[in-house]
Every structure is written in structure tokens, then in C-alpha cells.
Image (cartoon, rainbow, N blue to C red):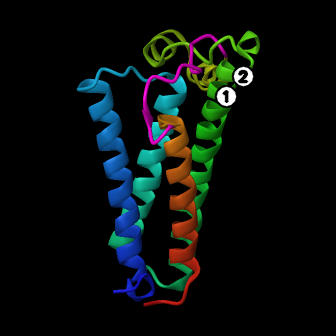
Amino acid sequence: MTLNRLSSRTVFALIALCCGLLMGYALFAQHVQGFEPCMLCMVQRVFVCAAGVVALAAAMHGAATVGRRVYGSLTALVALGGAYVAGRHVYLQWLALNAPEKLDGCAPSFEYALQNYGLPKFFSTIFIREQDCGVIDWTFLGLSMPTWTLFWFVIIAGVAVWAGFRRAR
């Protein structure tokens, strides 16, 4: 079966499944392997979940042309937002390796920011550099977890646009 034979509903369901698997591994890495996520990791998780929810809604709805385009665009926008955050995280890790004197960290812990800041300040702390997001404590095939997350966000965005704007199947 070629990829072109899959319906848009199936493609959106596969995107939602991919997001579910990404979140499943993130939770496994945290709770079983003991890797504590930084604030940027937590924000990336929110974007993964949001992309998965939009894709799941698209799969369940099975909208016509305009609806598919809206769902494809929304899924891609959410994934690109996640790619931006993941890209920032990859950049901080690059700084830690190549110019550590320029790296102060990235943000306070998720729990601390949530408990001690109002909502506007909570969101503004995402890019404050107080926590060490430059540490690479997990790799697969030589790439860090934020790099893999960036990779998957780009794939999800591209597939969502393709599913939303191709001819109906």
C-alpha cells in the first residue's frame, strides 16, 4: 500500500498515534528512566499533545476539503510552534557545547513557575535562562531528545499539510 492510497482521516489518525507514542516515550523517560524534564521539555510536550489532539479531531471528523485544510493547517501550525521551542532547546544545547560562557540555563522548573507566578509571567518564563537546558543527558544515534523532537515536529507539520491539502481519498 502506498502512502497516496491512505485517506486523509487515516493520515491524521497516524499523526495522532505518532504524537501519542512521542508522549508515551517522554513519560517513560521521565518516570522509568529518571530523566527530569526542564521547562522547554514541558512546553514541547504541550505542543506534542496539542498537535495530537488536533490531528485526532481531524481523523474523527473526516471533514470535506475546507475542513481538511483547516485541520491540516492547525496541526502544522501547532507542530511548527513546537519546532520553534525544540529549535531553541537545540540551540541552548549547542551553546552548552560550543560557548558555555554564554549559557546561563533556560527557565525555572515547571512546578516552581506554575505555583509561584501568575499566568502571564508563567508563560514569559519559558525562555528565561535560569535552569540548565543545555545539558544533554540522553542521546539516540548521536542526537539529543530535543533534536529528535524537532525532527518529529517538522515531519508532523509536513505530513499534516500534505494530508490537508492533497486531493480527497
Q: What residue span does the magenta drawing correspond to?
A: 129-142
> Which structural element holds mark 1?
helix
User: How many other residues sit within 10 Å of disc 2, few (<14), some (14-19) or many (≥20)?
Assistant: few
Q: Is residue 4 visible?
A: yes
Q: Main SS of the magenta segment?
A: loop
Q: Quadrant of residue 164?
A: bottom right
* Real-space CA distance between mark 2 and mark 1, rounded to the nearest whole angstrom: 6 Å
In the rendered structure, the answer to whether residue 32 lies left or right of residue 50 reads left
Question: What residue does disc 2 label?
Answer: 98
Type of the residue with mark 1: Trp
Could you tell me which residue is drawn at 44 percent across and 59 percent down? Answer: 54
- Quarter of the figure with the N terminus: bottom left
Q: Quadrant of residue 62?
A: bottom left
Residue 133 falls within the magenta-colored stretch? yes
Q: Nearer the viewer, residue 145 or 120?
A: 145
Instruction: From the top left corner, tell me how far across and down residue 81 is, in percent.
Output: 61, 47
Which x, y percent locates residue 33?
27, 25
Q: Quick check: 53 left or right of 164?
A: left
Q: Is residue 116 magenta?
A: no
**In the orientation shown, which residue stands out farthest toward the front?**
141
Which quarter of the rendering shows the C terminus?
bottom left
Q: Which amino acid lies under the numbered mark 2 shown in the image of this protein?
A: Asn
Q: Position of residue 37 (x, y in %)?
A: 43, 24
Image-based side of 144 in relation to 121, left or right: left
Tell me the residue at 58%/80% (across/down).
165
Task: Report the residue marked by disc 1.
Answer: 94
Name above or below for residue 20 compared with residue 5: above
Asked whether the residues under the numbered discs 2 and 1 touch, taking CB atoms below 8 Å apart as contact, a structural biologist would say yes
Q: Secondary structure at mark 2?
A: helix
